[in-house]
Image (cartoon, rainbow, N blue to C red):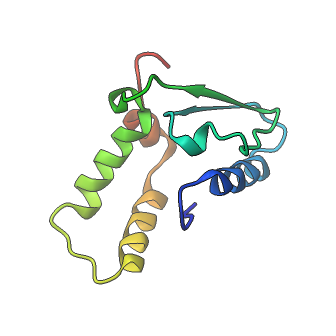
Amino acid sequence: MFLPEVNTDMMNIYFEELLKEYPGRDILIIMDQAGWHKAKELKVPESITLMFLPPYSPELNPVEKLWKWLRKEVTHNSLFETLETLMDALENELHKIIPQKYMQLCNCSYL
């Protein structure tokens, strides 16, 4: 899901879409402590549990490994004419990744 910004409103939209995709499921989300992740206006549904990483610890954030891999596989030494072509390249690569690859990329000893 590509959203135009990163803020509390976008997180609320993300939660809504996540619940549509996984109705009736309990969901655990591991997040850093970005301001929009902890804002008073954040509407966290009952079926979603948030777990916060310690401040300033990107090495503990599982998704950082995915971003690093995407930079290597998609954007390294590449020039994209527009933001749209970059987004298309990222989307194409993300659609090709099978669940086991996500598990491998985002594996952490504490999970």
- In the image, what residue occupies the spot 64% across and 51% down? 8
- In the image, what residue occupies the spot 43% across and 67% down? 92
- Residue situated furthest bottom in the rendering: 81
The location of residue 68, given as percent across then percent down, is 29, 46
- In the image, what residue occupies the spot 15% across and 65% down? 77
Please give left or right for residue 49 compared with residue 97 in the image: right
Q: In this orientation, which residue lies closer to the viewer: 82 or 7?
A: 7
Q: In this orientation, which residue lies closer to the viewer: 74 or 49?
A: 49
The location of residue 100, given as percent across then percent down, is 46, 38
- Residue situated furthest front in the rendering: 40
- In the image, what residue occupies the spot 64% across and 57% down? 10
Please give left or right for residue 57 compared with residue 2 in the image: left
The answer to whether 32 is drawn above or below residue 43 in the figure is above
Please give left or right for residue 14 compared with residue 80 in the image: right
Q: How many marks?
A: 0
The location of residue 111, given as percent across then percent down, is 50, 19
The location of residue 9, given as percent across then percent down, is 68, 56
